[in-house]
Image (tube, helix red, strand yellow):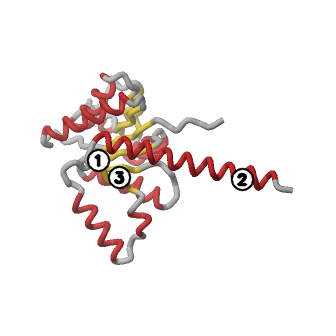
Amino acid sequence: MRRQPPRALCVFCASSDRVDPVYLRLAAEVGRAVARRGWTLVSGGGTVSCMGELARAARAGGTRTVGIVPRALADLEVADQDADELVVTDDMRARKGEMDRRSDAFLALPGGIGTLEELLEVWVSRTLGMHTKPVVVLDPDGLYAPLREQVDRLVAGGFVRTRSRDVVRWTTGVQEALDAVESGWAEVFEQVSVASVAEEMLEAEP
């Protein structure tokens, strides 16, 4: 019997209260779209800016939310106490590890250096074969264009392999981004299924 693909999406996004409201609306749209697909939302566990809009919209849509926040931020009373599950970690490193462990795919929205750090970490670990979870970026207005250009330059210079660059899927629309997550899951599931069949055939040989 074939297993159903996983359905827990980790979203990285901004926590700054100085961002353009367009990004708040984008985060809320993502939260609603995640809920419509029936996925669990895993996020940074904050109530401010895009992070808060994302989680509130997902809950309003009826889906489960998991917030993971370091104790230093929880103590500042920005933790999402309304989350279905709120996990408080000792520090930022433990936070990222817990987010990774509980998630089956990663989606980066426009954000600051924290979002960049989270994106790059799951990107690198994917290229090293430490996980096979989809990594998707939603960039509707080209905020990350300089990052893509920089990575292209690294590829041209021989610092990064082409296949390492290409494990990240770049999108500009919410539905496109979630469809990319879905197709990433399907590809991994198909690869696992093919490998399992091949292994069974080998074991059956005399």
Q: Which residue is drawn at the image coordinates 36% and 72% (left, top)?
A: 155
Q: Amino acid at mark 1?
A: Leu
- Is residue 123 shown to the viewer in this render? yes
Is disc 3 surrounded by few (<14), some (14 to 19) or many (20+) residues within 10 Å? many
For disc 2, the marked residue is 199
- As helix, strand or loop, the secondary structure at mark 2 comes to helix
- Residue 28 picture quarter: top left
For disc 3, the marked residue is 119
Q: Which residue is drawn at the image coordinates 41% and 68% (left, top)?
A: 162
33 left or right, relative to 205: left
Q: Is residue 165 above or below residue 67?
A: below
Q: Position of residue 10 (x, y in %)?
A: 39, 40
Which disc, if any, is residue 30?
A: none
Is disc 1 surrounded by few (<14), some (14 to 19) or many (20+) residues within 10 Å? many
Q: Amino acid at mark 2?
A: Glu
- Which quarter of the rendered picture does the C terminus lie within? bottom right
- Residue 41 picture quarter: top left
Q: Which residue is drawn at the image coordinates 36% and 41% (left, top)?
A: 178
Of discs 3 and 1, which sits in the foreground? 1
For disc 1, the marked residue is 138
Q: Position of residue 72 (x, y in %)?
A: 31, 39
Is disc 2 surrounded by few (<14), some (14 to 19) or many (20+) residues within 10 Å? few
N-term mark: 3 or 1 = 3
Q: Which of the two residues, 88 or 11, is positioned nearer the viewer here? A: 11
- Residue 189 picture quarter: top right
Q: Which of the two residues, 7 or 90, is positioned nearer the viewer here? A: 7
CB contact under 8 Å: marks 3 and 2: no
Q: Which of the two residues, 202 or 23, is positioned nearer the viewer here? A: 202
Q: Amino acid at mark 3?
A: Leu
